[in-house]
Image (cartoon, rainbow, N blue to C red):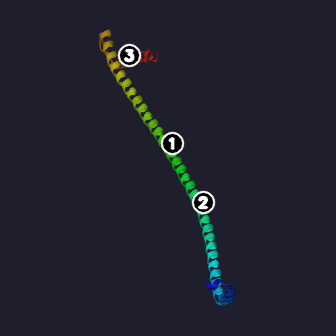
Amino acid sequence: MPQFESHFFSSLIFWEVVSFAILFFVLYKFAFPGILSMLEEREKKIKDSLDQAEHHRSEAERKFKEYEVKLNSAAKEAEGILTAAKERAQRLMEENEQRMTVEAERIKGDATREIDRERRKAIQDIRAQTTDLALLVAEKVVQRSLNEADNRKFTDDALEALSKSYQR
């Protein structure tokens, strides 16, 4: 192999080093600045993307906290509405109970007055029948017809005796 011969090998290495240096110089002058600028641009884009992602994350956290505050507020408001509804229902039940109590008292009073009126009417009917009966008995006892003054006197005496017997 001719490339491994010593006089040929040293010149080959020299030209390879020179070729590499020229290639490196050309790359350094023309390719590396473009590559480096592209890498810096890419680094800047990545950094901007990271900054933007951080901004979005902090914005999302802020909105999440706002959402939690609104949700807690809505829960408290719903609880307040529920409490108010329960209080209103309780108040309505108490008002209905009071109205029913008043109505029951009114009905009871009406019934008591009606019973009292019927009792008085019954007592008057009993007195009238008792008067007629007393007159009849008095006529039978006396065996004669009594005049109006006698009738009244006997009737009043009989009624007084009857009312005394009822009072005991």
The reply, left or right, for residue 85 in relation to residue 119 is right
Q: Nearer the viewer, residue 73 or 15?
A: 15
Callouts 2 and 3 close, C-beta under 8 Å: no
- In space, the residues marked 2 and 3 are separated at their CA atoms by 97 Å
Few, some or many residues within 10 Å of mark 3 (<14, 14–19, 20+): some
Secondary structure beneath dot 2 equals: helix
Secondary structure beneath dot 3 equals: helix
Q: Picture coordinates of residue 161 (x, y %)? A: 42, 15
Give above or below for 76 relative to 30: above
For badge 3, the amino acid type reads: Phe
The reply, left or right, for residue 136 in relation to residue 73 is left
What residue is disc 1 on? Answer: 94
Q: Picture coordinates of residue 58 (x, y %)? A: 63, 67
Q: Nearer the viewer, mark 2 or mark 3?
A: 2
Few, some or many residues within 10 Å of mark 2 (<14, 14–19, 20+): few
Secondary structure beneath dot 1 equals: helix
What residue is disc 3 on? Answer: 154
Few, some or many residues within 10 Å of mark 1 (<14, 14–19, 20+): few
For badge 2, the amino acid type reads: Val
What residue is disc 2 on? Answer: 69
